[in-house]
Amino acid sequence: MSRLFRAMVLLVALGSCGSRNFSVPRNLDNACQIVSERPAYLQAFKATERRWGVPVPALMAIIYQESKFIGNNRTPHQYALGVIPIGRQSSAFGYSQALDGTWREYQRAEGGSGARRDNIRDATDFMGWYMSLTKEEVGLAMNDTRNQYLAYHDGRTGYKRGTWRNKSWLIRIANEVDARAVMYDAQLRACRKI
């Protein structure tokens, strides 16, 4: 009996080492509840704000739009003939929905080879890095959440070319991201988290 008990304890211990909590915070419409429920998020957001100058509410609003705070979020599968899986829509993954190529570029430039898209600190640092390059190349202010999101979604080159102008759905979403950032800012100020 003791051997069985030891084996079960070992399995539980090993299983807990490998598991990661990628559940969604309970109330995504309340920034204070999000950061109270997940204090590591607020630490990551503030570290990114200090390093890159991206406001916490803007980070939160973009993460909400990109992944709904799901650390291992992926794009949906595509299907041929409606039933045959042919892969995912893109390589976007993690909190920031960074593409493979852009993530590798970040790893080489800033994050190091150990940076992970499903780690909130790495994901927000990536976003700060990307948005700071957008500020340098395009001239968008860090607190211009709407346009930073458009450049984040379509890429800096796409933003400069104006590819977003013909995407009414993307403009609507960028406005929603901006409105969410304003809402998160008011909430975080009210609960004195920023």
Image: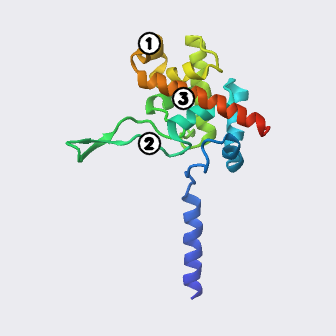
Q: Is residue 110 visible?
A: no
As helix, strand or loop, the secondary structure at mark 1 comes to loop
Marks 2/1: CA–CA distance: 26 Å
**Residue 166 in which image quadrant:** top left
Q: Which numbered circle lies on residue 162?
A: 1
Q: Tag 3 or tag 1, which sits nearer the N-term?
A: 1
Q: Mark 2 = which residue? A: 74
Q: CA–CA distance between discs 1 and 3?
A: 19 Å
Neighbourhood count class around disc 3 (C-alpha, 10 Å): few under 14, some 14–19, many 20 upward? some
Residue 176: mark: 3
Quadrant of the rendered structure where residue 69 is?
top right
Mark 2, Cα crowd under 10 Å, few <14 / some 14-19 / many 20+, is: some
Q: What colouring does the structure picture have? A: rainbow
- Circle 1 residues within 10 Å: few <14, some 14–19, many ≥20: some
In the rendered image, the residue lying farthest to the left is 81
Mark in the foreground, 1 or 3: 3
For the point 62% across and 27% down, the residue is: 128
The residue nearer to you, when weighing 4 against 79, is 79
Q: State which tag comes first along the sequence, 2 or 1.
A: 2
Lateral position of residue 163 relative to residue 85, left or right? right
Residue shown at 62%/19% (left/top)? 144
Q: Secondary structure at mark 3?
A: helix
Q: In this rendering, does residue 169 appear at all?
A: yes
- 139 to 174, vertically: above or below: above
| Residue 94 place in picture, x, y as percent | 51, 41
